Image: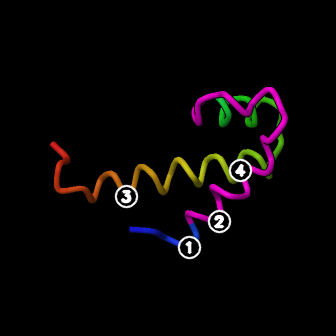
Amino acid sequence: MVNITHAAYVKNLQGLIEDTPLENQSLEDIIKAAHHSQDTGLFNNAAQHWNYSFFWNCLSPDVG
Protein backbone atom coordinates (compact mmCIF):
# COMPACT_ATOMS: atom_id res chain seq x y z
CA MET A 1 0.00 0.00 0.00
CA VAL A 2 1.35 3.42 -0.92
CA ASN A 3 0.44 6.43 1.14
CA ILE A 4 0.94 9.83 -0.50
CA THR A 5 1.84 11.50 2.79
CA HIS A 6 4.39 8.83 3.67
CA ALA A 7 5.87 9.05 0.18
CA ALA A 8 6.23 12.82 0.58
CA TYR A 9 8.18 12.41 3.85
CA VAL A 10 10.46 9.86 2.17
CA LYS A 11 11.05 12.09 -0.85
CA ASN A 12 11.69 15.16 1.31
CA LEU A 13 14.09 13.23 3.52
CA GLN A 14 15.99 11.92 0.51
CA GLY A 15 16.41 15.49 -0.70
CA LEU A 16 17.59 16.68 2.70
CA ILE A 17 20.26 14.00 3.14
CA GLU A 18 21.47 13.80 -0.46
CA ASP A 19 25.23 14.45 -0.71
CA THR A 20 25.60 14.68 3.08
CA PRO A 21 27.29 12.33 5.56
CA LEU A 22 23.79 11.16 6.56
CA GLU A 23 23.05 9.77 3.10
CA ASN A 24 24.22 6.25 3.97
CA GLN A 25 23.06 6.21 7.58
CA SER A 26 20.15 4.23 9.00
CA LEU A 27 16.86 6.01 9.50
CA GLU A 28 17.31 5.76 13.28
CA ASP A 29 20.77 7.36 13.06
CA ILE A 30 19.39 10.16 10.89
CA ILE A 31 16.66 10.84 13.46
CA LYS A 32 19.23 10.94 16.29
CA ALA A 33 21.54 13.24 14.34
CA ALA A 34 18.68 15.57 13.42
CA HIS A 35 17.48 15.69 17.02
CA HIS A 36 20.95 16.53 18.32
CA SER A 37 21.49 19.19 15.66
CA GLN A 38 18.02 20.64 16.26
CA ASP A 39 17.35 20.56 12.51
CA THR A 40 13.57 20.49 12.76
CA GLY A 41 12.92 19.93 9.05
CA LEU A 42 15.26 16.96 8.90
CA PHE A 43 13.96 15.58 12.18
CA ASN A 44 10.30 15.95 11.18
CA ASN A 45 10.70 14.22 7.83
CA ALA A 46 12.85 11.40 9.22
CA ALA A 47 10.67 10.83 12.27
CA GLN A 48 7.45 10.85 10.26
CA HIS A 49 8.96 8.40 7.78
CA TRP A 50 9.81 6.10 10.73
CA ASN A 51 6.34 6.64 12.24
CA TYR A 52 4.51 5.71 9.02
CA SER A 53 6.78 2.71 8.45
CA PHE A 54 6.06 1.46 11.95
CA PHE A 55 2.32 1.99 11.46
CA TRP A 56 2.20 0.12 8.14
CA ASN A 57 4.25 -2.74 9.56
CA CYS A 58 1.81 -3.04 12.45
CA LEU A 59 -1.00 -3.61 9.95
CA SER A 60 0.82 -6.48 8.30
CA PRO A 61 -0.86 -9.90 8.56
CA ASP A 62 2.58 -11.28 9.50
CA VAL A 63 2.85 -9.29 12.74
CA GLY A 64 3.47 -11.70 15.61
Q: Are marks 4 and 2 in contact (CB under 8 Å)?
A: no
Give the Cα distance between marks 4 and 2: 8 Å
Q: Which residue is mark 4?
A: 13
| Residue to which mark 1 is pinned | 4
Quadrant where the image shows the C terminus: top left
- For label 2, the SS is helix
Compare marks 3 and 4 and give the one earlier in the sequence: 4
Q: Foreground: 45 or 11? A: 11
Question: Is residue 21 a member of the stretch shown in magenta?
Answer: yes
**CA separation in Å, label 2 and label 1:** 6 Å
Q: Nearer the viewer, residue 53 or 15?
A: 15
Q: Earlier in the sequence, mark 1 or mark 3?
A: 1
Under circle 1, the secondary element is: helix
Q: Amino acid at mark 2?
A: Ala
Find out whether the residues at labels 2 and 1 contact each other: C-beta distance under 8 Å.
Answer: yes
- Residue located 49% across and 70% down the image: 3
Q: Secondary structure at mark 4?
A: helix
Callout 4 amino acid: Leu
Q: Which residues are magenta?
A: 6-28
Q: Circle 3 sits in a helix, a strand or a loop, which is it?
A: helix
